[in-house]
Image (cartoon, grey):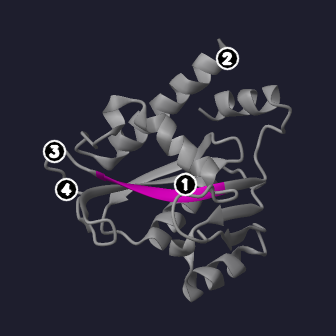
Amino acid sequence: MTERRQVERRCQGRLGEPSAGAIDRQSVKTATQSKEGGGDGNNKIKGRKRHLLVDTLGLIVAVVVTAANVDDRLGLLALWKHYFAEGVTRLRKLWGDGGYRAEWLHVWVWSLKRTHKIAVEGVEHTGQGFQVVPHRWVVERTFAWLLNYRRHRCDYEVLTANSEAMIQISMIHLLLKRLA
């Protein structure tokens, strides 16, 4: 998937690897009895969370699926570990919501400054009603793209690794449609 994302970025006049991105999570119900389950107390959903790291075009850089009771900040750590495991280090700026604010997370990010210069900025929703939130709308649009696939309305997989693979397959399909 990395190669397809790089080709699409180059077609859009960008460098192959992103320097900025957005992070968010989505809670979905599970349709099967899985080992990794739990309840998201914030959204009142029993199931799983999909944590996405996308570039500024909305293309998935990293995806992690966890139980719904896993904290958003721990999901962010898993995303970063997945991102760093690929050996990519160009990412410099991330935008997220208020769920990623924690002192221990900022200390951990600060410890990365020696090797990876990443800044996490919280972009808050202001006012009432629907508003397009700067920088964060990109990841929300990516979730909407994924929900166009009926398979992603609910998590049907027993293993979280299979859920991650299905999300990546859907993104590959979107990229192939763009290239065709």
Q: Amino acid at mark 3?
A: Thr
Q: Earlier in the sequence, mark 4 or mark 2?
A: 4
The residue that label 1 is drawn on is 82
Residue 98 relative to residue 147: left or right: right
Q: Nearer the viewer, residue 44 or 158?
A: 44
Q: Is residue 176 above or below residue 168?
A: above
Give coordinates of residue 170: x percent, y percent: 47, 30
Mark 3 highlights which residue?
A: 32
Q: Image quadrant for the N terminus?
A: top right
- Quarter of the picture containing the C terminus is top right
- Position above or below: 106 against 73: below
Disc 1 to disc 2, C-alpha distance:
26 Å
- Check the image and report above or below for 31 versus 169: below
Q: Which residue is mark 4?
A: 35
Residue at left 39%, top 34%? 166
**What's the CA distance linking mark 4 and mark 1?**
21 Å
Under circle 4, the secondary element is loop
Mark 3 vs mark 4: in front: 3
Q: What's the magenta region?
A: 22-28
Q: How far is disc 3 from disc 4 in space, using C-alphas?
A: 10 Å
Q: Circle 2: is it few (<14), some (14-19), or many (20+) Cα within 10 Å? A: few
Q: Judge whether 19 appears above or below 127 on screen.
A: above
Query: Which residue matches tag 2?
Result: 179
Q: Say whether disc 4 or disc 1 marks the residue closer to the N-terminus.
A: 4
- Residue in the image at 67% along x and 17% along y: 179
Residue 87 visible in rendering: yes
